[in-house]
Amino acid sequence: MRPELKPVEGLSLSDMALQKVNIPEYTVTLVPENYINTIWDDAKPLLMGGVDKSNNRWSIETLYYALMQGEQHMWVAFDEDKNITSVLTTQFITYPTKLSLAVQFAGGLEGQTSTSIFDCVLDRLETFAAESGCTCVEFWGRKGFAPWMREAGYEETSVFYEKDISHGR
């Protein structure tokens, strides 16, 4: 049985001031292949750190080629002033029993992972992956991502994070 709710004497919601939390707004979007050249000069330096850590598996030129061929997808996050704060690339990986959206390279402005942008990016990627028929999102990253990835529901397996987004499908 549910208890009856009673008003708190002397409390009026209309008299309470709403607190505005100053959380920046971010827009996270997939960049169409025909627009990659438009933002490449801004995106390239943000992706270089990840490419440089690939141990010569990738170069910035081979990543650019993969993006232009549609083998990888470029995502950007913009702040309220339309400045690019983060760039990442993804690709679909077909396994024998599932389809995954894999984050390949990610980079951004200093300190951007400590803001709400991280949540915005993950939410957008998970939605895109589910709409594309993927059952999981996977992410290779540095140990420093661990707190955010765990909070977002990802499991650390080595320095490989993954999240099941199938919801019983």
Image (cartoon, rainbow, N blue to C red):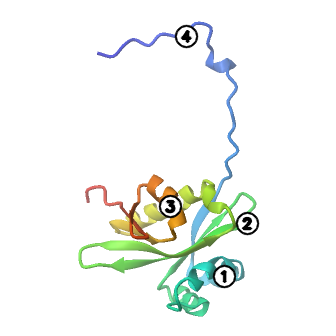
Q: Is residue 106 above or below residue 116?
A: below
Sequence-first tag of 1 and 3: 1
Tell me if mark 1 has few (under 14), some (14-19) or many (20+) residues whose alpha carbon lies within 10 angstroms of its own.
some
Q: Amino acid at mark 3?
A: Leu
Foreground residue, 127 or 42?
Answer: 42
Q: Are marks 2 and 4 in contact (CB under 8 Å)?
A: no
Residue 51 location, quadrant:
bottom right
Q: Residue at x 63, y 55 (%)?
A: 115
* Real-space Cα separation, disc 1 to disc 3, in angstroms: 21 Å
Sequence-first tag of 4 and 1: 4
* Real-space Cα separation, disc 2 to disc 1, in angstroms: 14 Å
Tell me if mark 3 has few (under 14), some (14-19) or many (20+) residues whose alpha carbon lies within 10 angstroms of its own.
some
What numbered label is drawn on residue 44? 1
Q: Considering the image in quadrants, where does the C terminus appear?
A: bottom left
Residue denoted by label 4: 8
Horizontally, residue 102 falls left or right of residue 53, namely left
Q: Amino acid at mark 4?
A: Val
Residue denoted by label 2: 83
Residue 42, given in percent of the width and then of the height, sits at: 71, 78
Residue 95 location, quadrant:
bottom left
